[in-house]
Every structure is written in C-alpha cells, then in structure tokens.
Amino acid sequence: MSHADSPSSLIRIEVDGAAYPVPAGITVIQAMWRIGRSMIHGVGCLGGVCGACPITYRLPDQLASKTGLACQTAVREGMAITFLPSDTSKKAIALLPKEAPTQKTLFQYYPETRRCTACRACSSVCPQEIDVMGGVRAAINGELSNVAEKFTSCVMCGLCAAVCEVQIKPHRVGMYARRLTGAFYPKEAAGLLNRIEEVRAGKYESAWSQLLSADEAALSNYCGSEEAAQKLAI
C-alpha cells in the first residue's frame, strides 16, 4: 500500500448504495476507476465539455441532493453518488426550413417548451451556470438569437431536462435554436478572426518555440503560470 493509499488518506463514498474506500482529492470518475467500476458509458472527454457524466450526489450533512459532472466533482467523505442514465430525449433531426424560422418552427419539435412554470430548477443544476430558464422563456417568446446566445456554452449533459417537472428538454431546445440562428442569423466570429490574424502575423511564434524546446518540468511550470493563461486567453 502506497502512502497515498494509506488508511489515513482514504475516505468512504457510496455508489448506488454500496460503500467503497477511495483516496481523497480525486474526482468521481477517478474514484470509479479506483473501485474497478467499468465506465463504458457515462464517461467521455474528462474535461467537462462533452456532458456525458451527469450525476446526483448527497453529502451526510445535507438533506437535498446536488447535481454535477463526475469528471469535475471531487469526492468527499460520506458522499452518496448515483450516475444518471443516458439522455434518451428526442433530437430534432430535420432539414432547416427554407424561410426564416418562427415560434412554430421550434414548437413543431418541442411543443412542451410552452409548459415552463419558471421554477428555475433547470438553471440551478446547470454545471455551466447557464440561465437555462431564461433561454426557455426566450424560446417561448420566439427570440431564437437570444436562446442561441444563452446556450452557447451548453455541453448537452441533460441535467436541466432531468429536473424539469413538466418534461421540457431545454438543452435540446437550445441546440435547435443554435442551428436555426446559425443558418438564418449568422454573426461574424470577430474574436476568432482576430486570433487568426495574430497567428499569421507571428505573435505567438516565440511562445510556440519555447513550448517545443521545453523539458517536462519547464512545460509543467509554464502551463500552470499566469503568463500562459494570459497568452491563451481569447
């Protein structure tokens, strides 16, 4: 037994009702690997981007359950964890309309959107801190560009749909609004175009050369530095 796995460094978690000892300071996904749980489904990018690993969990001193992404949530003593099933909601796979979309275009596929009660449960569980309810209300009002803007950072984890008491699928609504907006109301990606011009002008050649010539220790220090964060910021 390594020092990292000594009894003093282990905590107890529960997965689907069974207790397991795992090292402190790791994510829920890493804990699944440690206990030998097969993660064929419910795991993807490991970076909080793909939305494949939604979970609910409860801590010993809390009555209410919380939600999160298993690759971004650290284990804690006494945490009871349940993985949510894969999202089975219908995705609107259809040709884009020939004319500008209206409310009827979206409601053709997601009519339940109009049932929103403004309870804000969807917004409260979003790991990306999206104003999900605001996006749903904008969809009801036919403000597709507003919907698309609000759901720009959506990772399609489906947690919003899992907690919706009237069975709305906000993440699906947001994705379809993004498709419609991109097709009919495209905006120039000013930030991306500016970055392309900076690359062409050689702004990052020095930093790139530094990275290519760095050893492992120097690379680790550089990636964790404030300088690197500033250079990578868009």
Image (spheres, helix red, strand yellow):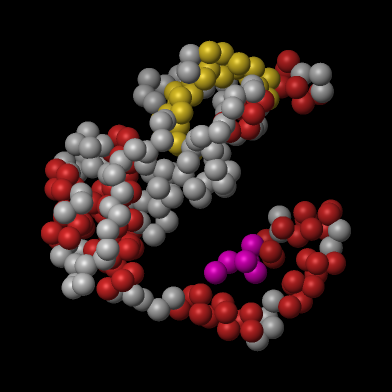
Q: Main secondary structure of the magenta part?
A: helix
* Residue 211 is covered by the magenta coloring: no
* Quadrant in which the N terminus appears: top right
Q: Nearer the viewer, residue 60 or 148?
A: 148
Q: Residue at x 34, y 38 (%)?
A: 88
81 displayed left or right of 107: right
Vertical position of residue 145 compared to residue 66: above or below: below
Farthest residue in the bottom direction?
201
* Quarter of the rendering occupied by the C terminus: bottom right
What is the x, y in percent for residue 107?
16, 53
Q: Is residue 40 visible?
A: yes
Note whether 158 is above or below 49 in the view shown: above
Residue 99 quadrant: bottom left
Q: Outermost residue, top direction?
A: 18
Q: Position of residue 104 (x, y in %)?
A: 13, 59
Image label count = 0
Residue 97 falls left or right of residue 156: left
Residue 141 visible in the current orientation: no
Magenta residue check for 232: yes
- Tell me which segment is drawn in magenta: 229-234
212 left or right of 115 in image: right
Residue at the (58%, 66%) spot, across then down: 233
Residue at horizontal 23 percent and vertical 42 percent from the top: 168
26, above or below 103, in the image: above
